Amino acid sequence: MGCSFSGLSALYDSANAGADVWINENRFRIVRQIGEGGFAFVFLVKEVVAEGASGLAGKKSSNPTHISDHGTYAMKKVIIQTQEQLELVKQEIRVSSQFSHPNLLPLLDHAIIPTKDKQGGSLKHEAYLLFPVHLDGTLLDIVTVMQSKREFFPTLAVLHIFRQLCAGLKHMHSFDPPYAHNDVKPGNVLITQIKEQPPVAILMDFGSARPARKEIRSRSEALQLQEWATEHCSAPYRAPELWDCPSHADIDERTDIWSLGCTLYSIMYGSSPFEYVLSESGGSIQLAIMNAQIKWPSTTKPPYPDTLHQFVIWMLQPQPAVRPNIDNIIIHVDKLISKYSA
């Protein structure tokens, strides 16, 4: 899906509740803001369909399972101030448009709008990306609340959430060449709670996703990768080889496996296994990660079996060559689900 441009810039000037926004030929009314970060804002929007029109549901490219029964969606608005930011948004659109999996958040539509600053000077852009809405929040939101109440997911719920993330990543890793998400973490996992059913988990935010395999053959290439990772990969979930990349290395999709291991720990205990160093005097999260210094919560009665702890350790191998791949992970988590369902 290429980037769409529209001349309806005036309709995009207001981000207040009640304002109308057009994304190509479809019209949406902003209900309220539901998130923000950096130069991006996320709004709950409701489609406005004229009498006799079919709206988003009538688009041939739309998957019927992604169309809201109530016409509500999530709209991400990105303020673009530089050519580099514009290219990053276009890259996110190109990458997102390749994925089609129930555990990956689909991009339903998009528009990139040219605007001018208030002085009428340099040309700017605003991007509008439309997604299905999941109002139960992110995994980070949920585990944060649970930690404040000293509550934990049951073992089977942990495994079911984790299994869904594995399924989404397998889809990305199965491309030729494979894609890496590069920022797997609880804040990038949407959760939908369904009564008397396991939570539904959906991996989102493909702004950092890139072809996974890179040949590093010089110190300058290694430093360039580290600089990129510093900007695009969240520190507590970043693989060791992205902190200190050798001058001769083959980087692959197992960077995501490290992040997946950190995320499994977080589903259980509410944070990355390395964030504890942030509260220690002189603590270095980089050193903790490079040495795989995992710290388990000190409780007299652990809420989870040791098999889950060993599962985390298996993924958090500092040497990527001995880290399991996504197929190995799925085989193992299926065995654990079978074991604890009995």
Image (tube, grey):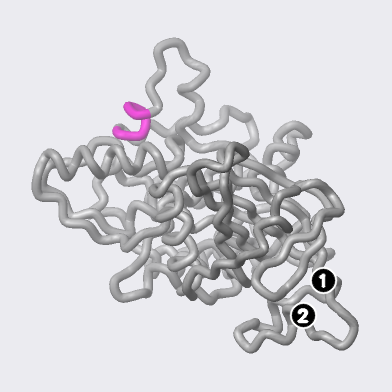
Q: Are marks 1 and 2 in contact (CB under 8 Å)?
A: yes
Residue 163, given in percent of the width and then of the height, sits at: 55, 64
Residue reaching furthest top?
A: 281
Q: Does dot 1 land on a helix, a strand or a loop?
A: loop
| Residue 337 in view, yes or no | no
Point 70% across, 45% down: residue: 35
Please name whichever residue, 196 or 188, is drawn nearer the observer in this view of the structure.
Answer: 188
Assign the C terminus to one quadrant of the image: bottom right
Magenta residues span 286-290
Residue under the image location 45 percent in, 40 percent down: 234
Tell me which residue sits at (24%, 36%) in the image: 244
Can the viewer see residue 293?
Answer: yes
For residue 111, what is the image quadrant?
Answer: bottom right
Name the residue nearer the viewer: 325 or 298: 325
Q: Amino acid at mark 1?
A: Gly
* Disc 1: which residue: 71
| 147 versus 73 height, above or below | above
Give the labeled residue for mark 2: 55
